[in-house]
């Protein structure tokens, strides 16, 4: 993940989805590279939140369904890593949450957004869980935020993780 504050020293990056698969990996790598990280979570007392705190991340409580809860953690931050999970919230909620994040980022003056999306291009596909990411990316762009979109199709570790949906047998 490449963020550059342009100041010679890393600044603050807010990570949405910090206790999930992608987000927690981003938090670990940013901390290792010297960035200050605000790892947003709905539950700061969870084991995953505590593990991030032990690594040196700030772990403020925030909920992407509540735009007001995003304002304080976003203030003064240079960058943002954003990811939502439609498998847990549904596609409509994913778009709403992503839009809330985009609006809070614009309000706070975030200078670089990295969005963990999915899909094969920046054109609609008819696959709801891919096309929802296009809507969210478009909202970031409409608000004038510098945006890098990552579109991983799958992560290799998911091929052996039986807790991942779709089930492991789907990969055969």
Image: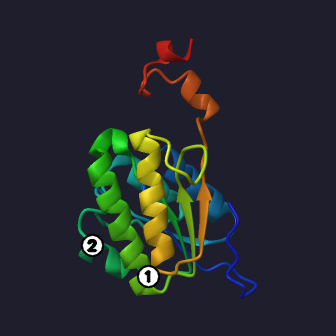
- Helix, strand or loop under label 1: helix
Image quarter for residue 62?
bottom left
Q: How is the image coloured?
A: rainbow
User: Which residue is rendered at x = 55% and y = 51% of the image?
Assistant: 123
The answer to whether mark 1 and mark 2 are in CB contact below 8 A is no
Nearer to me, 104 or 40: 104
Residue that label 1 marks: 106
User: Which residue is rendered at x = 47% and y = 66% of the image?
Assistant: 138
Marked residue nearer the N-terminal end (1 or 2):
2
Q: Going by the image, does 117 lie left or right of 86?
A: right
User: Would residue 103 be visible to someone looking at this image?
Assistant: yes
Nearer to me, 102 or 11: 102
Other residues around mark 2 within 10 Å, as few (<14) / some (14–19) / many (≥20): some
**Residue sitting farthest toward the right:** 8
User: Which residue is rendered at x = 39% and y = 42% of the image?
Assistant: 128
Nearer to me, 54 or 33: 33
Q: Going by the image, does 155 lie left or right of 62?
A: right
CA distance for labels 1 and 2: 12 Å
**Residue 125: percent from left, percent from top:** 50, 42
Query: How many numbered discs, if any?
Result: 2
**From what the image shows, is residue 33 above or below residue 155?**
below
Give the numbered dot on residue 98: none
User: Would residue 20 be visible to someone looking at this image?
Assistant: no
**From what the image shows, is residue 42 above or below residue 159?**
below
**Residue 155: percent from left, percent from top:** 60, 35
**Residue 165: percent from left, percent from top:** 41, 27
Q: Nearer the viewer, mark 1 or mark 2?
A: 1
User: Which residue is rendered at x = 67% and y = 81% of the image?
Assistant: 5
Residue that label 2 marks: 67
Other residues around mark 1 within 10 Å, as few (<14) / some (14–19) / many (≥20): some
**Residue 140: percent from left, percent from top:** 47, 71
- Helix, strand or loop under label 2: loop
């Amino acid at each position: 993940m490449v963020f550059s504050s342009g100041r010679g020293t890393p600044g603050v990056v807010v990570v949405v989805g910090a206790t999930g698969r992608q987000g927690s990996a981003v938090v670990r790598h940013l901390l290792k590279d010297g960035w200050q990280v605000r790892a947003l979570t709905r539950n700061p007392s969870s084991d995953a939140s505590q593990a991030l705190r032990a690594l040196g991340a700030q772990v403020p409580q925030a909920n992407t369904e509540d735009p007001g809860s995003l304002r304080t953690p976003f203030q003064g931050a240079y960058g943002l890593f954003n990811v939502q999970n439609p498998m847990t919230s549904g596609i409509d909620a994913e778009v709403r949450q992503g839009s809330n994040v985009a609006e809070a980022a614009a309000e706070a003056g975030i200078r670089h957004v990295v969005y963990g999306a999915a899909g094969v291009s920046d054109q609609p596909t008819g696959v709801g869980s891919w096309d929802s990411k296009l809507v969210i990316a478009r909202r970031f762009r409409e608000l004038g935020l510098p945006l890098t979109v990552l579109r991983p199709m799958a992560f290799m570790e998911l091929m052996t993780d039986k807790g991942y949906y779709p089930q492991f047998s789907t990969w055969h």
